[in-house]
Image: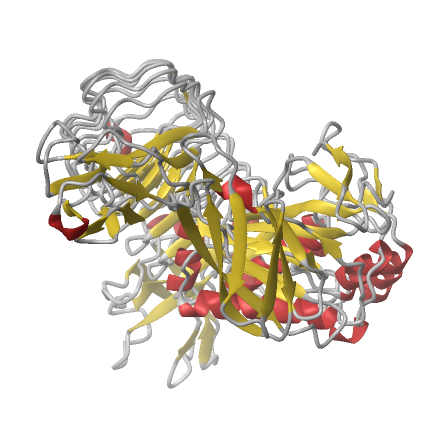
């Protein structure tokens, strides 16, 4: 530091000075340990400028990026040979930047600041709002390492390898809102671990080794809204462990191994809305475990080994809308278990051991929309099971010993217990279990008239409104009222079949009962110029006396379809494109009749060789419908030159796969039929979607029929977030599986070294065209195994059926969906279809390079959703050119 002397001294002098705090509140004061408090410098005679050198002491402390102290000249003695001028002090700045910080933090901050050296990092550089250090090896974090980051809102320190919790490291981050500390091996949290983070809203402590939690650890986090402690080593939780978290709304504790969850463990969390305790183990639940959670809306207890439920476990959860108890070991449910859950909308109890259900289990659950009891041991349903359930749209009861459970629709007289009593009579249609969905059932009367020709059972009701029956001419001659056909079971319902009882005889003892139309004939989908379709019409009628019935048929428009009937078999021959109605009449020997009418839709002959006939079972939003149509169009354009052999499907099996089927009947598969459903799978962030083929051609081994299932919750969330392109990509991905990607590789001999039972094996796809495309798109120098690398570490459903995520990254057919970013349908995928035998348009493949092949790796997306186990599995029927099953392949 220069000190000017004017005039220069005539003889040598000694200048004395003092160093002290700057006392400017806008500047960090240098630590007094950084410098000596005073000093002096000798100035020879005749020198006009004296150079003062101040030694800065180094230590292990982390200093601010910029700090200052005050340099002041001491007042000279009277005989010192000099006097002070107007300026006697000045500020001195120590510009250390971030050089004294933990090396890994120092390097990250330099890179983030784009500075050329650590000392060049300024306070302005540290005014960042987001810092992602995930995956960087940082063995320790010292107090002060993060100083100066006052504007930071988001900090990710996941997987950095801390050997101990970094006590005091976060005190300067007063504006931090999100802190992620996943996968670091912490075993304990010290008291006041997050001191200074008063504005923190999200804290992620997942995948560590925490064995317990205490309220002291979370002291000061009054603003925290989301806490994740999943996949740790928690065996118990003390009462009041979260009492400091008054603003908490979401708490994720899944994947832990709890011996007991005791009374009051969640005390103080009246504002909690979402609690996840699934996918781990809960040895015992005490009756008051969820006491005080009056605002809870979602309680997720799936796959936790739960064997019993205390009777009062859910008492007081008056706001609960979603309850998951699936994939546990429940053998019974206590009476009144769900009595307080009047707002419950979704109840999943599938894959337990329930052999019976208590009476009145769901009474008062009028808001219930989703009920899953599939995969249990139920042989029968309790009486009035569905009474009051007026909102159900998803009911799954398949895979129970008693399934399909028969619900009988029966006509009864309501104004008099004696049906033969004089009339007129009032009747109603009833179902003892209650109607699980709304039903409209046609009625007809022989010998009389009806005030209504339909009986309507509202969802949740036991019987229809009354209908008046009057004998012809107002007399008392016998009248027979026939109900039927029974309504079709809607797409969101499985494990139920609806039947109709014999005709109701009024005002007499009954003579010849007319035929009963038992069930509807499904809508017939045909294609102009395609094969005729035939079915046995006698399967749709029943004669109460067991007499033989004669079938005849008529069409409303012979230009669209013609109909013939012989020996009870009806044959439909398609004509021009259009729609019409066909009516079948069953006549018994005395001449009594019953009719069934059904629509026939004839599509135009395919204008190009390859055709995907997608049948959507459920109502969807306009944008979802557009995404489905766009995905079908994209695949059709790629495969436009493919011509596969037509496959007659017949009437015996509903088109679709397993429980994803349509009531419609399709005469011929040309080239592939896909039945799609948007429905409940497992809720948010579980299985995103799943698909696969179930009918495969014998000669080409390529699919003819497949199914596609999309989780309604996940799809709605993507749409709400504005990620409509993601919706289309999910559909594209799943249609790819129906076409054979990952699902027929083994049958074609193209998958090598499967990994499902050998995790980490070098699983790869051996199609030569796909390998050539892999090389062309940046994989020519890939040397980590054979080509094309297939996912080998993700478990069943993802492994062996997708490209390897770690290599192909943002390719469409990897097992992860990058939310908000493009996943590309590459030449590799297109050519893999050519390896299966399709003719492909390679020019329609999207522009894609293997990540890292151009020198830069793909940036980690903000959010990745695993497709999970997205392959629909079940027996695959292999059929010949006549549609006859030649073998069934277990899958």
Image coordinates for residue 801, horizontal then vertical, percent: 71, 44
Front residue of 120 and 777: 777
Left or right of 877: which side holds 169? left
Q: Residue at x 87, y 42 (%)?
A: 749
Front residue of 772 and 455: 455
Residue 103 visible from this viewpoint: no
Image coordinates for residue 83, horizontal then vertical, percent: 28, 76
Residue 433 visible from this viewpoint: yes
Left or right of 24: which side holds 561? right
Q: Is residue 660 above or below residue 716?
A: above
How many marks can you see?
A: 0
Image coordinates for residue 358, horizontal then vertical, percent: 25, 18
Front residue of 310 and 53: 310
Front residue of 776 and 15: 776
Left or right of 416: which side holds 723? right
Q: Is residue 581 above or below residue 82?
A: above
Q: Residue at x 20, y 53 (%)?
A: 452
Q: Residue at x 74, y 70 (%)?
A: 638
Quadrant for the N terminus, please: bottom left
Quadrant for the C terminus, please: top right
Left or right of 46: which side holds 641? right
Identify the colour scheme used. Answer: secondary structure
Image coordinates for residue 576, horizontal then vertical, percent: 62, 75
* Residue at the extreme bottom: 7
């Amino acid at each position: 530091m220069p000190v000017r002397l004017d005039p220069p001294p005539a003889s040598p002098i000694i200048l004395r000075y003092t160093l002290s705090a700057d006392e400017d509140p806008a500047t960090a004061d240098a630590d007094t340990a950084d410098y000596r408090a005073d000093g002096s410098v000798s100035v020879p005679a005749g020198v006009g400028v004296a150079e003062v050198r101040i030694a800065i002491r180094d230590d292990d402390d982390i200093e601010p990026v910029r700090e200052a102290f005050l340099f002041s000249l001491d007042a000279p003695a009277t005989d010192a040979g000099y006097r002070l001028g107007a300026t006697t002090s000045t500020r001195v700045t120590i510009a250390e930047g971030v050089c004294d910080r933990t090396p890994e933090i120092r390097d990250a901050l330099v890179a983030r600041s784009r500075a050329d050296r650590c000392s060049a990092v300024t306070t302005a550089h540290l005014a960042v709002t987001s810092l992602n250090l995930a995956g960087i090896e940082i063995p320790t974090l010292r107090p002060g390492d993060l100083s100066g980051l006052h504007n930071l809102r988001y900090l990710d320190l996941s997987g950095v390898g801390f050997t101990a919790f970094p006590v005091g490291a976060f005190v300067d981050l007063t504006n931090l809102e999100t802190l992620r500390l996943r996968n670091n091996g912490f075993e304990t949290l010290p008291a006041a671990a997050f001191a200074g983070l008063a504005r923190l809203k999200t804290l992620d402590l997942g995948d560590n080794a925490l064995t317990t939690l205490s309220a002291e650890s979370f002291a000061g986090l009054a603003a925290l809204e989301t806490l994740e402690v999943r996949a740790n080593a928690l065996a118990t939780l003390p009462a009041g462990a979260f009492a400091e978290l008054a603003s908490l709304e979401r708490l994720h504790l899944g994947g832990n191994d709890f011996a007991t969850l005791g009374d009051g463990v969640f005390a103080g969390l009246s504002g909690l809305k979402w609690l996840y305790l699934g996918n781990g183990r809960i040895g015992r639940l005490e009756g008051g475990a969820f006491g005080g959670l009056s605002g809870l809306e979602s309680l997720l207890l799936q796959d936790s080994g739960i064997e019993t439920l205390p009777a009062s476990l859910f008492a007081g959860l008056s706001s609960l809308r979603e309850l998951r108890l699936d994939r546990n070991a429940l053998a019974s449910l206590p009476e009144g278990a769900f009595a307080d859950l009047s707002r419950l909308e979704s109840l999943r109890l599938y894959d337990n051991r329930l052999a019976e259900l208590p009476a009145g289990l769901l009474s008062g659950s009028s808001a219930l929309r989703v009920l899953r009891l599939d995969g249990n041991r139920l042989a029968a349903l309790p009486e009035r099971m569905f009474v009051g359930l007026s909102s159900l749209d998803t009911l799954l009861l398949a895979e129970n010993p008693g399934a399909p459970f028969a619900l009988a629709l029966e006509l009864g007289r309501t104004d008099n217990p004696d049906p033969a009593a004089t009339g007129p009579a009032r009747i109603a249609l009833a179902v003892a279990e209650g109607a699980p969905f709304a039903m409209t059932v046609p009625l007809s009367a022989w010998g009389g008239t009806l005030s209504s020709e339909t009986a309507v059972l509202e969802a949740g009701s036991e019987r229809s409104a009354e209908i008046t029956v009057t004998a012809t001419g107002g007399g008392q001659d016998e009248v027979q009222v026939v109900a039927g056909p029974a309504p079709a079971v809607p797409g969101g319902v499985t494990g139920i079949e609806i039947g109709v009882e014999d005709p109701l005889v009024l005002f007499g003892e009954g003579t010849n009962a007319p035929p009963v139309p038992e069930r509807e004939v499904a809508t017939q989908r045909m294609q102009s110029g395609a094969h005729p379709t035939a079915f046995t019409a006698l399967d749709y009628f029943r004669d109460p006396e067991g007499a033989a019935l004669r079938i005849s048929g008529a069409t409303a428009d012979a230009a669209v379809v013609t109909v013939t009937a012989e020996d009870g078999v009806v044959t439909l021959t398609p004509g021009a494109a259009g729609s019409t109605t066909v009516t079948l009449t069953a006549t018994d020997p005395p001449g009594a009749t019953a009719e069934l009418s059904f629509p026939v839709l004839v599509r135009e002959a395919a204008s190009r060789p390859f055709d995907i006939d997608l049948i959507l079972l459920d109502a969807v939003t306009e944008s979802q419908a557009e995404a489905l149509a766009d995905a079908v169009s994209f695949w059709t354009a790629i495969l436009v030159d493919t011509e596969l052999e037509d496959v007659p499907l017949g009437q015996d099996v509903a088109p679709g796969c397993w429980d994803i089927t349509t009531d419609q009947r399709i005469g011929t598969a040309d080239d592939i039929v896909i039945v799609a459903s948007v429905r409940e799978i497992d809720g948010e962030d579980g299985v995103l979607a799943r698909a696969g083929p179930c009918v495969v051609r014998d000669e080409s081994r390529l699919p003819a029929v497949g199914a596609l299932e999309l989780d309604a919750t996940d799809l709605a969330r993507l749409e709400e977030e504005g990620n409509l392109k993601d919706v289309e990509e999910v559909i594209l991905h799943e249609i790819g599986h129906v076409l054979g990607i990952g699902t027929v590789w083994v049958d074609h001999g193209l998958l090598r070294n499967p990994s499902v039972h050998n995790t980490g094996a070098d699983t790869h796809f051996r199609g030569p065209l796909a390998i050539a495309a892999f090389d062309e798109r940046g994989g020519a120098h890939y040397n980590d195994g054979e080509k094309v690398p297939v996912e080998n570490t993700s478990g069943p459903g993802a492994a062996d059926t997708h490209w390897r995520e770690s290599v192909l990254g943002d390719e469409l057919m990897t097992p992860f969906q990058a939310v908000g970013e493009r996943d590309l349908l590459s030449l590799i995928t297109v050519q893999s279809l050519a390896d299966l035998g399709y003719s492909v348009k390679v020019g329609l493949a999207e522009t894609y390079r293997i990540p890292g092949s151009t020198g830069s790796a793909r940036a980690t997306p903000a959010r990745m959703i695993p497709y999970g186990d997205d392959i629909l599995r079940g027996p695959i029927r292999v059929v010949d050119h006549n549609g006859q099953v030649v073998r069934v392949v277990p899958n």
